[in-house]
Image: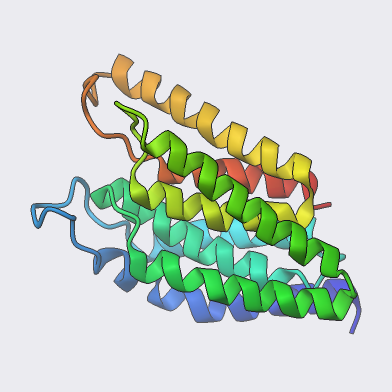
Amino acid sequence: MGEIGLSVLIALVALVIGVPVGHRVVAGVPPPDGGEPRRGAPGAAALGIGTAAVAAAVTIVLHRHPGWLPAYLYLSVVGVWLAAIDVRVHRLPDHLVLPAYPVLVALFGAAALVDDTPVRLLRAVLAGTACWLVFLTLHRLPGSGLGRGDVKLVGLLGGALGWLSWPSVVFGMFAGMVLGGVGALVLLAARRVGWHDHLAYGPFLLAGALLAILVGGG
């Protein structure tokens, strides 16, 4: 089986495992304050299509590196769920984010063994730690709109981008913040939020990381 065939097979396995449970995962996360969700959960079909689209894009870019795909497809599936959850209830639940750390370490560790690239694994750990520390500092600034969930999320994203390169880390983090700023301005202009409302940054951070993977993954 060639690299393309193996990559497609890995992507199909990820979708078969991830898509059927996505709607239940997203709909099952309650708001942090026990109130009503800000939005309804996306339908199973819409969530499945979104997950498949992200997985397909990542697979196309990384098809020459099938050893990397399990980690990035796992992050793709969980990332779509987290984006939908954050939009719906403004929350990035620990039961999805925290287990992703050891899972990604294991998957990238396996990729490092297969490709004999321990330097990539070391860079991923350093990048994830650096991003976590930077965003933790930003979170603690007065008036910061970043939540603790955002800080935990960027540790994962920084590690995944660090596997690719340091420029991918910088590009992904910068793109996420820019997208968040533009999104906030659009919502303010449309009067969907006020100046003091909390903005769900998770989807923007995830979108910035996805852009960095699509740009730098090849």
In the depicted structure, whether residue 197 falls above or below residue 188: below
Query: Residue 178: x and y, percent?
Result: 54, 27
In the depicted structure, whether residue 160 falls above or below residue 113: above
In the depicted structure, whether residue 151 falls above or below residue 188: below
Relative horizontal placement of residue 125, taking residue 145 as reference (left or right): right
Q: State which quadrant residue 129 falls in.
A: bottom right
- Pick the front one: 126 or 190: 126
Relative horizontal placement of residue 121, taking residue 13 as reference (left or right): right
Q: Residue at x 65, y 42 (%)?
A: 211
Q: Residue at x 41, y 47 (%)?
A: 150
Q: Is residue 169 visible?
A: yes
Relative horizontal placement of residue 23, taking residue 213 as reference (left or right): left
The outermost residue toward the left is: 35
Q: Residue at x 73, y 63 (%)?
A: 59
Where is the N terminus found, in terms of image quarters? bottom right
The mark tally for this picture is 0
Relative horizontal placement of residue 163, taking residue 210 as reference (left or right): right
